[in-house]
Image (spheres, grey):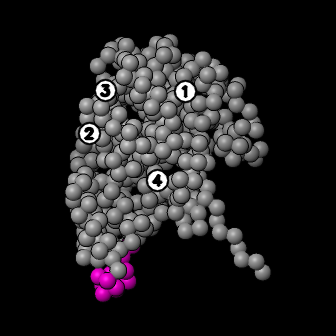
Amino acid sequence: MADPQPPEQHVDPWNVQGGEDGRIDYNKLVEQFGCSKLTEDLIARIEKATGKPAHPFLKRGIFFAHRDLADLLDCYEKGVPFYLYTGRGPSSEALHLGHLVPFMFTKYLQDAFNVPLVIQLTDDEKTLWKGLDINESRRLARENAKDIIACGFDISKTFIFSDFEYVGGAFYRNIVQIQRCVTMNQVRGIFGLGMEDYIGKIAFPAVQAAPSFPDTFPHMFGARKDIRCLIPCAIDQDPYFRMTRDVAPRIGHQKPALIESRFFPALQGEGGKMSASDTNSAIFTNDTPAQIKTKINKYAFSGGCTTTQEHREKGANLEVDVPWKYLNFFLEDDKALEHIGKEYASGRMLTGEIKAELIKVLSDLVARHQQTRAAVTDDVVDAFMAIRPMAAVADGKA
């Protein structure tokens, strides 16, 4: 009998499967998707354009790929306004830390460039893909909005919307224009959807595409089409915006630019995204200090050796060690991170010691987030989701 073939890497907006070793080959993914790697020159341009130091996510290669970022910076330097667009599909009561990553980075971009932001809550998507009751999906959208608002966004420049509540008018007109430009064959090729899927799934990509166009938000931008869009997201969302970029010039719009991140690994290691339904695969924003400590000590995959003696001799494998990967996301001090990496890789630092470092970092981060979130009332959510004029923003003014 022939040996079974190793699994092929597969990434789409709903499923992430690593290759033979369970890990994602990001070079292969960039080539497959046709996006570009983020270079040091582009990072330097961001610093120069904003007058702000690059976010650690940029310096450490966590946001590593892009589409048309150089063109967007060219326009920005000439005074052409742009806005940010990102989103969240609400399927759990609280976000896990992987969900926070794009919002933390988007907060940096909003502050650094001083630009408006729209945040889409795809409660309709979760009803279609997860089978959630519509009212439950709407409820989770509002709960997730509280976690998002707790990241510190500027309410004067931020509009958060639920698809179930906001789709209509100019938004729906753009959806229909997009839908007229995309064939069933294209949907099958880009998203892997087929004749057995709900028609709602087949039609949904246009709903996620439409916020890439400024006139989807007439209360913010009026009927203007000259305002660019930058989308910070994980790279699994790229298929949506490949489709969007293909359609855009055909309906009189500019192509959105993207800046894309690596995946945040599950506690058990790489090979897929964390699951909101598996509470032991991730640290959640509503976890207690005791839960954080237990999860990291019990479930965080270690690149350390089996015995202390062997570890002292060989050191840790940082390529697979989850505590090290998490510290790369959330330990802000570059020098401290470099020191930990050297000590752990050499074997001078043990697995229990790096886990203790991570427990402290994440416990502090989650505690701060919980304190901020506790102040986000339903009235605050309503204010962020209110359809309201943003005239100064629409004119591209600070």
What residue is drawn where x is 35% and y is 25%? 115
Q: Position of residue 151 (x, y in %)?
A: 30, 41
Residue 255's disc number: 1
Instruction: Mark yes or no: residue 306 visible.
Output: yes
Return the residue at label 3.
114
Q: Amino acid at mark 3?
A: Asn
Q: CA distance from mark 3 to mark 4?
A: 27 Å
Q: CA distance from mark 3 to mark 1?
A: 21 Å
Q: Amino acid at mark 2?
A: Pro
Counting residues from the start of the chain, the first of labels 3 and 1 encountered is 3
Quarter of the image for residue 206 reads top right
Is label 4 or label 2 in front?
2
Return the residue at label 4.
263
| Secondary structure under the numbered disc 1 in the rendered image | loop
Instruction: Mark yes or no: residue 107 visible.
Output: no
What residue is drawn where x is 55% and y is 48%? 30
